Amino acid sequence: MVIPVEDFTSDDDVMTEGISRSLLLDRKKSHEAAFDKIVQKRFPGAINNQDLVSKTVEILGHKGYSPANTLLGTSLCCDELARQLEDDFNKVYGNNFNLGGLSGFPFAGKTGFGSMAAHIPD
């Protein structure tokens, strides 16, 4: 079951901080439906970005992670297809620390990870 982003809450409502209700509303539905159909044809069972973000936020929320205590670090491919996913996560967690990368493998190295670690909220 996927819970819409606007329904995320915790005992202290920390999860609602920084979560944009527009995450599920601001995208063009017809374009997404056509794109999702193409993806499903090639990759049966794949989930769309919105479902990925919702599931990720839900799972991390149960483990105590929230926008207030989490630094979003990404290592997505630099092409335009990954930008929407990065933007969707940014709407929840705020700006990300981009480690560079390809297919999820970061290019930042030891120095880059050290720099990212210095930005993690307390």
Image (tube, rainbow, N blue to C red):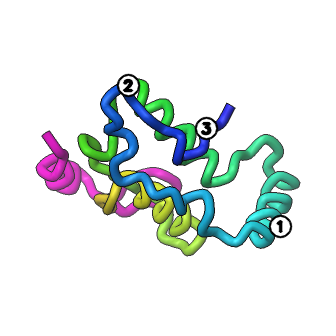
Residue 121, quarter of picture: top left
Q: Which residues are magenta?
A: 99-122
SS class, disc 3: loop
SS class, disc 1: helix
Point out residue 94 in the picture as x, y percentages from the top left corner: 33, 58
Q: Is residue 105 left or right of residue 48?
A: left
Name the foreground residue: 38 vs 95.
95
What amino acid is labelled 1 in the image?
Ala
Please say whether residue 23 is one of the residues in the magenta stretch.
Answer: no
Quadrant assignment for the N terminus: top right
- Please report whichever mark, 1 or 3, sits nearer to the chain's N-terminal start: 3
How far is the residue under mark 2 from the one under mark 1? 35 Å
- Please report whichever mark, 2 or 1, sits nearer to the chain's N-terminal start: 1
- Residue at 32% x, 62% y is 95
Quadrant assignment for the C terminus: top left
Point out residue 116 in the picture as x, y percentages from the top left corner: 20, 52
- Please report whichever mark, 3 or 2, sits nearer to the chain's N-terminal start: 3
In this figure, which residue is indicated by the disc labeled 1? 34
In this figure, which residue is indicated by the disc labeled 2? 63
Name the foreground residue: 69 vs 82.
69
Please say whether residue 117 is one of the residues in the magenta stretch.
Answer: yes
Q: Are marks 3 and 2 in contact (CB under 8 Å)?
A: no
In this figure, which residue is indicated by the disc labeled 3? 3
- Residue at 73% x, 45% y is 46
